[in-house]
Amino acid sequence: MASLEEFNLVTRQWIYYTMAKLFLLSFLTLALYSFPVEAQKQLKTLRSLVKAKNTGEAMKEVSRLESDSVCRMFPELYDLAIKTQVLINNVENEKVYLKKQCDTVKFFNSTLQIFNYAVKGDSVESYLNAHKKAKFKLRKKHAEMLRMYYPNLNMGARYFYTRGKYEEAKNLLEMSLLMARQRMWENQPVDSTHKEFVSNMYRFTYSAYITKDYSKVERYKHILLEHPDFSQSVIEIYARSAEAMHRDADFERYLRLGMGKYPREEFFFEELAKIYMTEKRFADAVNLADWFYTVQPTSNKALRLKVQALYSMQRTDECVEVAKTLAMRDTTLQYPEVNYYVGQLLMSQIDTITVPTNMFSQEFKTSKMRIKTICAQARPYLERYRVLTPQESAKWAPLLYKIYLELNLGKEFEEICKILQ
């Protein structure tokens, strides 16, 4: 059974707790009723500046008030900020009407700021409604006004996007897309078709990628991946973004997705090939090359990848056959190294031939004939490699030296000796 002292301690704690609750409730009640009075006082200067159409000083005052933890909770602050931005917007709009030079950046930026401050103000009103049962006074007014300015968001986005100003385009597109989901606008029709929305999603995605705002790139992935007009392009964007963020697993996953949906698109193939060869996943590289070759039987890139992978795996006979095919088909001489693969691998077979010491034996003659045959087969490939890559003499010179020696080609042998000196 608790002692009298323990009972008194618990009682005192309960009294302190109850008093604290009553004090907090009284404070909140006082704050609720004093809120409009304080707002009237704090916003007086800003009202005067807006009334005087001093937009520059008005926006400085808006910034100052927004930085104040109390003032930023005044919904009217954002209404006054909107009015200031409308004044700025009207000035530029009037210039267009009078066919004067308009500051297009200022015009569209003020449009964006009208929406920004409307969203901020609605967030404050939503908070006050949820926590203090305050009524929405500005939501309907702002929602109706924003509908008039909404087309300018899309117009500005197109203006900046087509001029390569992707940061500005991204901000306008982001607001245009987010407004459709704002609570303040849920009962307002949006003057855009579904097609326009999806196009804006793609433009936003591309703009985010170009401006390296990678955290926003995949925002509309669930829609764009399924859209036939944009799917291929966004998979590449997602892959490049993942690579830029060093998300290696996602990078490869997107490349595989791209290969599966668009097997003829070389970007996905080339990047996967690069990964497999860099990570020494040569078996994967061979499988990729074979698969891509079935899709594009004329692809020299597939043959080249297979040659490189087989060469690295030391699968000599297969590598020589594929390399010969590629060397024959490479009429534009894009892959000179395949000639080296053929020549070097053929010449490596000489190392497996044992030449008897008896120069008059049949075995000696047979062995030398095999060596000469191999040298004759390797010669055109290595000579072509020499012509195409003169700077790679460390590779082709020793092999041609041996070939010219075995084939008893005096003039060519003397020339190669000078190169090796």
Image (cartoon, helix red, strand yellow):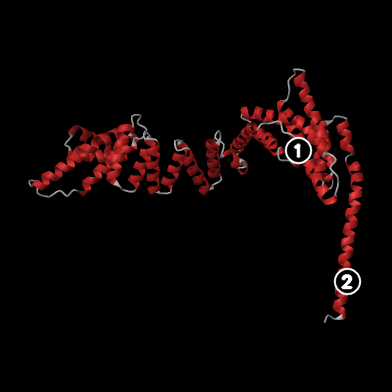
Q: Earlier in the sequence, mark 2 or mark 1?
A: 2
Percent from the top left, x then y, of residue 111? 74, 31
- Rendering quarter of residue 135: top right
Look at mark 2 in the image and give the residue it sits on: 12
The quarter of the rendered structure image containing the N terminus is bottom right
The quarter of the rendered structure image containing the C terminus is top left
Sort mark 1 into few (<14), some (14-19) or many (20+) by Cα contacts within 10 Å.
some
Residue extending farthest to the top is 99
Percent from the top left, x then y, of residue 401? 23, 39
Q: Is residue 258 left or right of residue 182?
A: left
Amino acid marked by disc 1: Trp
Look at mark 1 in the image and give the residue it sits on: 185
The residue sitting at 18% across, 42% down in the picture is 371
Amino acid marked by disc 2: Arg
Percent from the top left, x then y, of residue 298? 37, 33
- Rendering quarter of residue 84: top right
Is residue 276 in view?
A: yes
Look at the numbered disc 1 and give the secondary structure of its residue. helix
In this view, the residue in front, 377 or 236, is 236
In this view, the residue in front, 77 or 297, is 297
Q: How many numbered tags mark residues here?
A: 2
Q: Is residue 295 left or right of residue 8?
A: left
361 relative to 328, above or below:
below
Look at the numbered disc 2 and give the secondary structure of its residue. helix
The residue sitting at 85% across, 50% down in the picture is 132
